[in-house]
Amino acid sequence: MSKLRENQVKVEHSVLKKYGLRYSILAAWDDELRVKGVRIVPAIAKPLEAVRVKISSGCFSVCDVGSDLGRIEGILVSTATSSGRTNVDEWLGSLGECMSETANVDEIQKRINLPAVKMHYNRFHFGGPCGSHTA
């Protein structure tokens, strides 16, 4: 494997691990909104589950997983902002923090009370160009 490809694999592995925590933050936020009685688009449960499977399988690219997470995040931000029943800034802060190189994963997991999705990195990816698969 060339040095460039080794670096690409290393970066992709690192980002997918961070996406495991990002998923967990989004799932915890979804749970909090539901507990507070906020009406959430019913169609969010299936994409949340699909992206969890994508992360844990390790068979989907950073681009595909990131695209799915972005759509889910958009729905939650819109829903939470409209409801006024949750602190959107705290959740967005956690989402930003989880993608940082210096993120304290244990601290974030304690705050959300949900572990990061464990992933097994496979160098095989389903599908073609980024965005060709949606949750």
Image: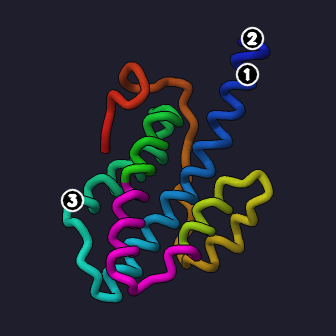
Q: Who is closer to the viewer here, 37 or 87? A: 87
Q: 61 left or right of 16?
A: left
What is the secondary structure assignment of the residue under circle 3? helix
Q: Who is closer to the viewer here, 43 or 80? A: 80
Q: Amino acid at mark 1?
A: Glu
Residue 47 rendering spot, x and y as whole percentages: 30, 53
Q: Amino acid at mark 3?
A: Ala
**Going from the N terminus, do you reach mark 3 or mark 1 first?**
1
Residue 6 numbered mark, or none? 1
Residue 45 rendering spot, x and y as whole percentages: 27, 62
Mark 2 highlights which residue? Answer: 2
Instruction: Tell me which residue sits at (31%, 39%) in the image.
Output: 134
Q: Are marks 1 and 2 in contact (CB under 8 Å)?
A: yes
**Going from the N terminus, do you reach mark 3 or mark 2 first?**
2
Q: 5 left or right of 19?
A: right
What is the secondary structure assignment of the residue under circle 1? helix
The quadrant where residue 115 appears: bottom right
Q: Are marks 3 and 1 in contact (CB under 8 Å)?
A: no
Q: Give the CA separation, mark 1 to mark 2.
A: 6 Å
Q: Give the CA separation, mark 3 to mark 1.
A: 38 Å
